[in-house]
Amino acid sequence: MNWKPDKNKPICPQLCEHMSVLIASGEYNPHDKLPSVRDMAISAGVNPNTVQRAYETLEQQGLIYTMRGSGRFVAEDVSVSKQSVKTLRFEKTEEYFSQMEALGFSKDDTKNYVKEW
């Protein structure tokens, strides 16, 4: 897993966001088996309890499911994940524009900067 969490923010929500993106992008397909909690923790460089909480959250959101004795798998309906990523994209964009506005940039200035970038 090529992921670097922001140490200044809670890790579990970041891991959930990252996993949602991986599912929505097709990195993980419906019914693909996810790494075990221990393997994911090692790969992500986080505490296994954090991965356990992230998996539980993703399951509550309907993005993954558990087969007792077999592990965790990506849910059939990836539209939930795609909607989650769409919402995340909107929130991150809104946060970026708010931060730029706090620095004194207008929305038009920020849009132009993004286009140039």
Image (cartoon, grey):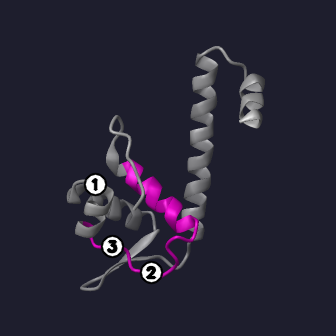
Secondary structure type for disc 3: loop
Give the farthest residue toward the top: 104
Q: Is residue 13 above or below residue 92?
A: below
Q: Are marks 1 and 2 in contact (CB under 8 Å)?
A: no
Earlier-in-chain disc, 3 versus 1: 3
10 Å neighbourhood of mark 2: few (<14), some, or many (≥20)? Answer: some
Residue 77: x and y in percent read 55, 75
Q: Quadrant of residue 73?
A: bottom left
Instruction: Determine which of the numbered discs, if any, sits on residue 35 in the image.
Output: 3
Q: Nearer the viewer, mark 1 or mark 2?
A: 1
Residue 30: x and y in percent read 51, 79
Q: Which residues are magenta?
A: 13-37
Residue under pointer 2: 32
> Is 3 positioned to the left or the right of 88 in the image?
left
Residue 101: x and y in percent read 64, 20
Amino acid type, callout 3: Pro
Residue under pointer 1: 45
Q: Quadrant of residue 61?
A: bottom left
Question: Is residue 32 found inside the magenta-colored segment of the image?
Answer: yes
Residue at figure coordinates x 44%, y 61% from the top left: 19
The image quadrant where one finds the C terminus is top right
Secondary structure type for disc 2: loop
Amino acid type, callout 2: Asp
